[in-house]
Image (cartoon, grey):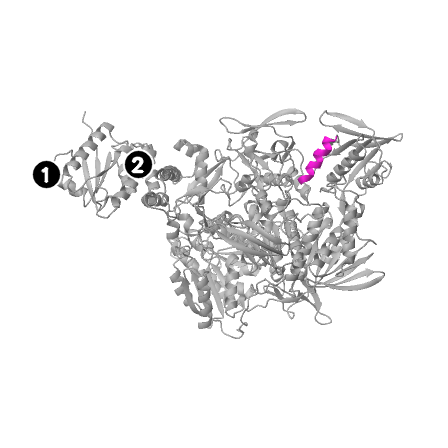
Amino acid sequence: MSEKEEFEPKIIGFLCNWCAYAGADLAGVSRMQYPPNIRIVRVMCSGRVDPSFILEALKDGADGVLVAGCHLPSDCHYISGNFKALRRIKLLKKVLEQFGIEPERVRLEWISASEGDKFATVVKDMVDQIKKIGPNPLKGGIEA
Amino acid sequence: MVEFEPKIIGFLCNWCSYAGADLAGVSRIQYPPNIRVIRVMCSGRVDPVIVLEMFADGADGILVMGCHPGECHYLEGNLYAERRIKMLKRLIACTGLEPERLRLEWVSAAEGSRFADIVTDFTNQLKSLGPSALAGEKPDENILSCVRAAERAAGTSRLRTLVGREKKLTEEENVYGEKVAQEEFDELMEESVKEEYLRSRIYLLAKDESISIEELTKHLSADSEIVLRHIVVMKRRGLLKMDRIEGDNPLYTALEAI
Amino acid sequence: MKDKVGAVLVVGGGIAGIQAALDLADSGFRVYVVEDTPSIGGTMTQLDKTFPTNDCAMCILAPKLVGAGRHANIHLITNAEIRKVEGEAGNFKVTVTRRARYVDSEKCTGCGVCAQECPVEAIDEYDEGLNRRSAIFVKYLQAVPSTFIIDREKCIGCGTCQEVCRADAVRYEDKDEHVELNVGAIILAPGFEEYNPSLKSEYGYGRYPNIVSSIEFERILSATGPYSGVVLRPSDGKIPKKIAFIQCVGSRDETTGNTYCSSACCMYGIKEAVIAQEHTPGVECTIFFMDIRAYGKEFDAYYNRAKEEYKVRFVRSRIPKVEEVPGSRNLLVRYVAEGELKEEEFGLVVLSVGMRPPKYAKELAEILGIKLNKYNFCSTNTFSPLGTSRHGIYVCGAFAGPKDIPESVAQASGAAAEAASIIASERGKLATVKKLPPEKDVSGEKPRVGVFVCHCGINIGGTVNVPEVVEYAKTLPDVVYAEHNLYTCSEDTQKRIREKIEEFNLNRVIVASCTPRTHEPLFRETVREAGLNPYLFEMTNIRDQCSWVHIREPKKATEKAKDLVRSIVAKARLLRPLKKPTVNVIPAGLIIGGGIVGMTAALELARQGFEVHVVEKEKELGGHLRTLHYLLEGEDPKEQLSKTVKQVMENDKIHVYLGAQVVDVSGFVGNFKSKIMFNGEEKEIEHGIIIVATGAVEYKPTEYLYGLDLRVLTQHELEEKISKEEFKAEKVVMIQCVGARTKERPNCSRICCGQAIKNALKIKEVRPETDVYILYKDVRSYGFKEDYYRKAAEKGVLFINYDDERKPQATNENAKLKIKFWEPVIKTEVEIEPNLLILSAATIPNPDNKQLSEMLKVPLTKGGFFLEAHMKLRPVDFATDGVFLCGMAHSPKYIDESIAQACAASARAATILSKKALEMEGIVANVDEDLCSGCRICESLCPYSAIEMKEQTEEKRVAHVIEALCKGCGVCGTACPTKAVTMGHFTTDEIMAQVKATLVEEIKA
C-alpha cells in the first residue's frame, strides 16, 4: 500500500440466509449505496458462525468481521440460533481482547429482511470505524 | 444615464435562419447590434440546459431561430425545437425570470428582412423589459439558484423523455394506437415541470449541507406538506437521504446522482 | 355425477390464500390462485411488524411467497378475476379473466429499469398514497411474481419502457384473456378492505394531513415505507411528540352501518403504538378506546407490556370529534375521562380503521351462488365455520368475518382440508412430477467448474465489467469454462447451461448474478436436469449486494465481483453431492383428545383416506361440548355432538380408545411409535403424525365466596341450571375475568364474555323480568358477537365496568349475599343483593399438558398452554415436524375457532400423510462417530430435537442426527467441541475456503 493511498478495510460479512442476507438484498433492490469493502458469505443461520471462521478471517487479514442475523427474540428461522450467535460472539470478543485485537473489529447486528437501510448504514459505519482503528495487526503474516 | 443595451444570444440553424441572417447582411439591412449569433446545425439542437446556462450567465434575451415548419433540413428538428421551447418557457416561468426573454422564430434563407425585423423587435421588447435580474455585477442570488434548479430539471430524463415524445403522442399516435389530446399532455407537462423544478431546488439546497424541511420550506416558499412529498419520491429515487435528526427535525442531504 | 377433478381454485392470494394453496399443493393437488392485484401477498406485505411477537412481517412472509411462486403445483393467475362458475362440488368449471398486464411474465426479469425510465408518475397504492410510483411498476420490491405491469389509466403510451427493456418483455398489444379452469373445489380468500375513514367526516381525515389511517401508519413505520421507518407528520415532516390512536373507526358504530367489531384493531393499535415508541423513542402514545379486546393468545401480556414498559396511555372514551389547530396543524382531541370533558393536543392522530368485506363481495357471491351475511361478509355457522352455502365452496380469512393473521392462516389450512376431502380420490392425478435423468456419479473426479456471469440487462453490466469478471474467472483453479449472459435466468440460458455441462463435462456450476434467495431453486433444477446433483451448484450475488449498491464505483464494484467469484469458486471446488434423505410415511394419525376438536380432525383425516387413532381420557367422546346446552348464535350443541359422535363411531378408518392414555411416544415425523394404556393393557400404535387436541379446563374459583355460598356459581353451572329449567332468580350479578387477567394468569380467557352474554340473553328469554348486571373489565365480544352484546344491552342487561383498583366485593352477611362495586358513571359505590352471583371463570390449561409436552418434546407457554412453532404463520404446527395442535390445547377459543383449527391441523398433517415417502432438505448435519465424544452439547442445542444419542459401543454413546427432523441451521456443528458434526453444503471446510479465498488472492490449486 502506498502511503498516500487511503486505507481500505476488508470486511467479511457472515449473513444469515433468512433475515440479514434478505436485508442486504433489499438494500440492493432499493439501490442504497454503501462502500464496497464488504464481502458477504451466506450461512443458513447466524448460529452457524463458528468462532473459528472469524478467527480464520482475522488471521487471513480481514480488518473486520460482521455477523448479522435475525432480530431477537423470535425472528430467527431456526427458533433460537440468533441467541446462540449472541453468546458466542460475546465470548469471542473477550478472547480477542486478550490477544490484543480490538474487539470492535467483530460486530454482531440484527438486521431484518425489510431493513435494507440498516444494512447499508451498518456497513458504512463499520467501514468508518475500522478506518479509524486502522489495519488488522495480523495482516502481513504472523504465526497464528 | 446610459441607455440599457440588452445582450441577446441568437441560436440560428445552419440551413435557413443563418442563411437568412447572411442575406440580411448581403442586402445591407440594418438592425441593432445587440445580438450575438451562435450557429447550430438545426434549431432542434438547442438544448434547454444550454439556454438556461446562458440566462444564468447573464443573457438578457435568447432568440432561437429555425426553418419554417415543413422546411427543416432534418425534416422535423424545428418542430421538436418548438416543443422544447414551450417546455422551457414553463420552466423559466417557475424561476422568476420573464419567459418573454426567450423567443422562437422561423426564418427562411430568403427572409433577410424578417430576420432583421425580429431582431429589432426583440431588442426593443427587451429594452422595455429592462435588464435581466442575472445580468450585471450583482445578479439576484435567489433567481440565480432558481435558474440553476431549472437547468437541473431540464436535464432530468423525465422532462427530456416527455418533450421528446410530445409530438408523436399528440400528433400521431401512442403505442396503443391512440392520440393523446394536446390539453391532456399540456396538463401532464405543466405538472411534471413544476415537480421536477421543485425537486431540483430541493436537491441543490440539500447538496452542500444537510437541511430540514422547515428550512427548505422557507427557501422555497412552498407548503411543507408538498416538500415532504417530494422528499419521499427523491429518497426512493436515490437522490436524497435522511442524514440525521436534530430535535424533531430530520435533516436531508443530496446524494450524487446515480 | 361427473368425474371429480384433483385441482382446487383459490380466490385471493393474501396470506390465507397462499397458506391454503401451499397445503393443498403439498398434499398432491393442483392449485390455481386467482389474485385481483398484480402480485400475491395481500395486506400482510404492507405491515411493518406483527403482534404479539413484533416479528418483521416481510421476514416471515417472504419465504412463503417465494415458495408459492415456485411451487410446481401452484399456478398463480394474478391481475385476474372470476367471471363464471358452473358445475358442482367435485367438478366446477370456472371462467377467469386475466386482465391485460402489458408485460410478458415469461420474459420480465423484474429488473426495474423500465420503471426508472418511465416519465409518468402515479400514486403508489402500496404506500397508501404517501409515495409515488411509475406508470409501469411492481406492487412492492419483493413482489411475487416480480413481473411488472403497466397502469393503463396513467400510461401515456410513449414507448420508453419497451425501448429500454433488454428482456423484450413489454407487450403493448396485450389484451384481456379468458381462462377456463376445471377444479374440484373452490376456496374463497379474497380478504377485506379497510374502512374509508373520510366517511366519518367528524374526524377530518382527508382534510387534515396529520390524521392518518392505521394502514398508512403501518407504511410510515415500515423501513421500506415513505419515511424509512421514522415517524413523521405528513404536514411538515417533523417528528410528532404526541400521537393519539382512535379505535373503532368504522367498527362498533351504528352511524356507519358497521356494528360488528373488527377484531384485530385493538391489537394492531397497541402494536403500532409500541413500534412507534421503538422507532421514535420519547414519543408519547395515547390510545382512545371503548374496550381493549386483547382476547388472543398472549395478547393481554402484550397489552400489559405496552402499558408498563412502553408507557402507552390508555383512555377509555369514544372520541366525538377531532379538529385542527390552525398554525401548528396539531389536532385537538376532545374526550371524556373520569366523567369530565377534556381536550388535548396531539401532533399526529392515527385512526384504527375497521375491516369491510371486499368491494366486489356481492358480485363474487352472485357469480359463486353463495350467501352473504347482513354485512356482506361470507355467511357461515358455528359448526361449519369454513363452509359456504354452496357445497364444494369454502371460505377462510377475513372474508368470513374480520380476523387477524393467525386465525386466517388456521382457517386457510382448515379450508384446504375441507376442499381436499371432496377430491381425496383424485390426489396426485393432476400434480406435476418431473422426469429427471439419472444422477451422474462425480465422486473421484477432479472438480471441473463452469462459471456463468449475468449482465442482468444493464443492472449488473452497467456497473460491473462483466466480461472482465468472466476472463478473471477463467484464470481460477479448476475453472474449465466461463461465459457471460444477458440474463442468466432466462429460459434459453437454462438450455445453454445444460449444454455446457454436457460439452465441458462440468461437475460444479456457479452462477454469479442476483440473489440465491429467489433464484437458487431455478438453477439447482437446471443442473439437476443436466444430470448433476443439485448441491453441486453454487451462486454468488453480484447484483443486489454489488452492482446496485456501488453504482458510482464501477472499478471497485468489478474488483468486488471478482473477489466474490473467486471465493465462491473456492467453495464450489469442495462441494459434495448431497442426497435428500427420504423417510417412509405410515399413513395413519394419532389424535390425542376426543372432544369436538379431536373428532373433527379425525373425521377430516378419515375423509381424506387416512387411518386415525383417537385416544380419549374419558369414557365418552365429546369433551367440553358435553357441558354446553345452547349457543350464542342459536345452534343446538347437543344435536351436533351426537351427530359427530355417530359419524366418528361409524367411520371404519377411525379407531377410538376411550378411557385411554398415551404413555410413550418415540420416533419422528412419518414414523412414530406410541404406547397407549387401554383397558388395562399397553397397546402399540404406529403412525405418521400426531395431533394434540387435549382441550382445556375451567378454573375453580377461590374468589367471591365460590364454594362457600351455594348462590355463587360459574357460568357453566348457571347454564346447567337454566337448561334444567331450575332458574328463577330475580336479580343476577355476573363478574367477568375471575381467575383471568390477573397477576398469575395475565391472559384473557377469550370465551367468557360471550358466555356471559349468552347466559344473560337466555335469562332475558326465559325470565324477562330478571335484572342482570355484568361487571366487566372490557367487554370482548369481538367480530359478529358484538351484535349479541348490543342485543343484551337493549334487553336491559346492565354492563358495569370495573378495574383492578376497585374490584367488586362479595359478602355473606346474615345469609344475605351482597355485592359491592363502584359505578364509574355516577361515581358512587353501589351495593346490591342478588339471588345469584355468577362467576365467569377462566379457562386454564389442562393439567396433563406438562407431562404430554415432555413426552412429545414440544414446548408450553409460560401459562401452560401448548406453544406452536410460530404464533403468526404456523398456528397449528409445532416446531417438531409431524406434531400438530388445535383447539383449546393451543389457547382458549370458541367452538367455531376450534373446529377451524382442527381442520387446519388435519390439513397440515395431510401434507405429510399424503406422501409415500418424505423428501427432506439435503442440507443436514452429519456426525463423525469416531470424533464424537458423546458430550451431548449438540443434543441440548438443537431446537428441533433432531439429535439423539445412540449406543455405538457398550461404553460409548454418540450423537446421531435424525435427518427427517434436521432443518440444517448448523448450530450443532458450530458448538461441537470435537468438530464431529459437519453441515452439508455449509461444511466448515467449505466456509473456511470461501473466507480464505475472499481475503487471499491466490487460491492454491
Q: Which residues are magenta?
A: C782-795
Looking at the image, which residue sits at the far bottom?
C444
Q: Residue C762 at what x, y percent from top left?
A: 78, 37
What's the amino acid at mark 1? Answer: Ser
Taking C508 as reference, is C602 left or right?
right
| B200 drawn magenta | no
Q: State which tag comes first along the sequence, 2 or 1.
A: 1
Most foreground residue, C623 or A93: C623
Q: Residues within 10 Å of mark 2 (few under 14, many from 20)?
A: some
Q: Residue C437 at what x, y percent from top left?
A: 53, 71
For marks 2 and 1, give the CA distance: 33 Å
Q: Please give the label number shown on residue C1.
A: none
The image quadrant where one finds the N terminus of chain C is: bottom right
Same chain, marks 2 and 1?
yes
Residue identified by numbered label 2: B89
**Vertical side of B5 occupied by C193: above or below:** below
The residue at the point 74 percent across, 41 percent down is C634
What's the amino acid at mark 2? Answer: Lys
Residue identified by numbered label 1: B27
Most foreground residue, C36 or C827: C36
Q: Identify the subunit bearing mark 1.
A: B
The residue at the point 59 percent across, 52 percent down is C86
